[in-house]
Image (tube, grey):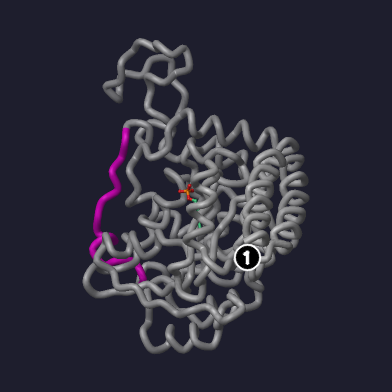
Amino acid sequence: MIENIVRSYIKDIEVYKSARDEFTGKAEIYLDANENYTDFTGEGKNRYPDPHSTALREKIEEVLGFRKENTIITNGSDELIDLLIRLFCEPGRDSILIERPTYGEYKVFAGINNVNVIDVPLTDDLDLDTEEIIQTIKDKKPKIVFICSPNNPTARSYDISKIREIADANENITVIDEAYADFDPSFVSSYTLLKENDRVVTLRTFSKYWALASSRLGLGIASEDVIYYLNKIKAPYNVSLSAQRDGIRALEEKGEREAVLKDLIRERGRLSAELEKFSFVKRVYKSDANFILIKTDDADSLYSYLTQRGIIVRNRSREILLSGALRITVGSKKENDALLEALNEKEKSFVSR
Ligand SMILES: *Cc1c(COP(=O)(O)O)cnc(C)c1O
């Protein structure tokens, strides 16, 4: 029962009813929310937005197939990570489990909430260490197990059967962050596990594939009970009208995104193959995402060399298992060419030395 996993005092908190919650129909005259009656923008921005992003969730059901009753829209999926920790973990007592290396925000939000972080390293080939994770779940009983697939910064998707095994062994909540799922054509979403396991929560975002990082649109997919509690604790108007409209428009323009994906996957392959050729690149990891992880003989010097050329990549070399690692986002063909040209020059000076 989800109710038994929720932070105890949240169960008793009464839901804040906003004006748009109390009256949900259509009316001629709204005098209930102390808004300004002047619409300076001509787009209705003087009015509070729909607290539940209903039209966007309906569009998501239509286009992506995630049932409306099982979804929530947030201010980026980062808000969802925070909400989930606040919903399930008692400060000063509970813990979350993460694998390392992974996305940094799980740890940050746990820290802000005074929630302990247990980490289990990935295997040497950057896969889930299922056995160790399940043993740790049994020993330490974390309230939430976070799994990021495809993982940031390793760019690797995990096998759905491994994720299922972990989620089944976990009596508490398993959150699968699928921010990069759209870049892996063979990806099987953890959403498919929800039918058999109501403690599975899937996170998606409009920031990457949908090219709306600035709009701040996160998508949570979970059981109706989890959605009920998340709605209870989120800020009433957490997603702006413009953001809700941006999301709907993006879904309507689905075909354009698919065209970009084709180019991106081609560029990802080309960039990976080209990167292999440099003598200072030790390894190029297979990518299921829109970025590539490489290991180099000296990440710091390569990073600063590229920065001087006006090309910014991410230095991940201080993470466990990632010495010498840089994370490179796949850019446009022109941007990737510029990167390769800079690396070619580096190679020449390297060889002539
Ligand atoms: C980029 C990213 C997100 C997206 O965060 P938003 O708040 O939706 O922009 C979530 N998880 C991971 C692993 C990411 O890399």
Identify the image quadrant of the N terminus.
Answer: bottom left
Snapshot quadrant of residue 17: top left
Residue 304 can be seen, yes or no: yes
Residue 62 can be seen, yes or no: no
Question: Which residue is at a point 76% across and 60% down the rendered structure image?
Answer: 273
Snapshot quadrant of residue 229: bottom left
Q: Residues within 10 Å of mark 1 (few under 14, many from 20)?
A: some
Residue 128, placed above or below residue 213:
below
Which residue position is annotated with label 1? 280
Q: Is residue 77 magenta?
A: no
Amino acid type at mark 1: Phe
**Magenta-colored segment: predominant secondary structure:** loop
| Count of all numbered marks drawn on residues in the image | 1
Q: x%, y% of residue 182?
A: 66, 53
User: Could you tell whether 339 is left or right of 215 in the image?
Assistant: right
Question: Which residue is at a point 53% across and 41% down the rendered structure image?
Answer: 310
Q: Which residues are magenta?
A: 5-18
Q: x%, y% of residue 77?
A: 46, 51
